[in-house]
Amino acid sequence: MTTGKPLHELSIAEAGAALRNGSLRATQLADHALARIAAINPAINAFVTVTEDRARADAAAADADFARGIDRGPLQGIPYGLKDIYDTEGIRTACHSKLRVDHVPSADSAVAEKFRTQGAVLLGKLTTNEFALGNPDPDAPFPPALNPWNTAHSPGGSSSGSGAAVAAGLTRIAMGSDTGASIRGPASYCGIVGLKPTFGLVSRRGVFPLSPSLDHCGPLTRSVEDAAIVMEAISGHDPNDPASANVSIPKFRSLMASGVKGLRIGVPRHFFEGAKGLSPEALDGIDSSLQKLRDAGASVEAITLPDYELFTACGRVIMYTEAFAIHENDFRQRPREFGFSTYMRMIMGAFTTGPDMVQALRLRRELTEAMNAAFSTCDAIVTATALGPAPRMNTPGDWAMPSDSPMQCIQFNVTGHPALALPTRLSGSGLPLALQIAAKHFDEPTLLRIGAVLEEDNEILSRWPQLAHT
Amino acid sequence: MIAEKRIPSDDQLREEFEALARRAGIEVLDDRREAMFASFCDYRRMTALLHGARTAGVESANIFSIESVKRRQ
């Protein structure tokens, strides 16, 4: 112990300070995390593979480096997990699919490489929905992750294990991917922080694609500060990712403490007010947070964007079409190897016509320009993510049609703007509710500034779900 | 205002569904045919939304306008 907190409650910065002043060793942190995983993971299935030997070796190497005065940065000695679509050299990366259940990559993904070379401690691979799409399938090769706040409920997807693991205190850092909501959805349902960066800021090399022009890699963390630290470690140009942007990387952590005084916040209320499935508690959470931002000196005004339905149509058509193009041979040759809900969604890409796709790409340009225009009058946009608390886990054969999704996240995948999901309050049923903040391309610091204000006295981020083993 | 492409009748939709499946080279599995067709109808409503009037300036694009991102040449 260092500050009197259990080790899993130490922030990255707190743990890092203790590691550097000698009051904590990385092997202690790793042992603590592995013990929690052994005790809690069977109840929530957050980890699909636990890399115990690798974790102990990474931790020992970090301690040895500290002893020699070698400091590889803020992640040295800090445990983390990777969604099981991130390639890891010598460690199975199955994408939760029968089609890749024996796949062992020969090289690390770019993000895994960054964590490894900066001395972080790999705890294991985290559960996902198959190929980062769809719902948990009863015929999947591994069990689905469950929500630590109530294991009868969904943790969201597709970074389901990432959300569950951070919420349950199994790791401070879990990497996810977001093609339509897959970081922000689990963050919302699990009551943690999820950051979908600007398209091109974090390399996707070695991460199995769902829809390459919509895929984003980003962290799920316990706090905004943790997210800022991870972003500094994983951002940067990668010539081996065709979409990687060659931009300078800001000091996210130091910029996040600037407050929100003078910031202009736009709110597209027409997106979520009156939307099917909006819970009054979710709306209250958003409005209470907006009041908090006003009280801190920001101005808040309603803005109008194109209809949300257009973002959904544009994003879903591009997503399913790109995904089908990746898997079309398997759809022809071994269709029953896909889980049912993956199959039923992804195969819709087979029905896209050429003109449909061209019009989707034209609409994408139009929607992106509209979003850019909105950002000419405001510094950030605050809107809903999940329209209510986590639903109950799906029953076999139950798979939501895309148009019925209770999640409003895909607009920022279509336009590539960065977005941060953050919890607002607990519902009456004891489940987290959330909102998201979006900003101009490559303006993650503004997201983190706003997130840092909303994080203060946050009723969810200061609590832990009461699992049987905690 | 969302301009929608006309949605065909159920019979026409079913013909379109079968033709597009053949065109894509996929076999429609018998035990999934009705669920797939229901999903196709939902998807068809979605694709109809894409066909609204656009100006000539709105060319097909991947993600960004040129000024919004800097990439290595």
Image (cartoon, coloured by chain):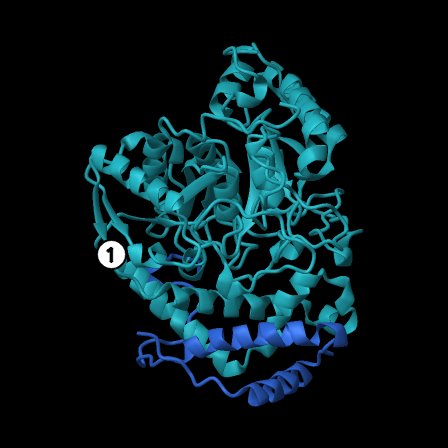
Chain colours: A cyan, B blue
Q: Quadrant of residue A25?
A: top right
Q: Is residue A259 left or right of residue A139?
A: left
Q: Considering only vertical position in the picture, is B16 above or below A72?
A: below
Residue at the spot 73% in from the left edge and 62% down from the top edge: A338
| Amino acid under disc 1 | Ile
> The disc numbered 1 marks a residue on which chain?
A
Residue at the outermost front position: A428
| Quarter of the image with the N terminus of chain A in it | top right
Look at mark 1 in the image and give the residue it sits on. A303
Q: Nearer the viewer, residue A416 or A88?
A: A416
Residue at the outermost right position: A102
Number of residue marks:
1
Residue at the spot 66% in from the left edge and 20% down from the top edge: A32
Q: Quadrant of residue A75?
A: top right
Residue at the spot 30% in from the left edge and 42% down from the top edge: A287
Q: Is residue B11 left or right of residue A11?
A: right
Question: Residue A373, how many percent across, how many down?
Answer: 26, 61
Q: Is residue B39 visible?
A: yes
Q: Nearer the viewer, residue A119 or A397?
A: A397
Question: Residue A44, how many percent across, how many down?
Answer: 66, 37
Q: Residues within 10 Å of mark 1 (few under 14, many from 20)?
A: some
Residue at the spot 26% in from the left edge and 47% down from the top edge: A379
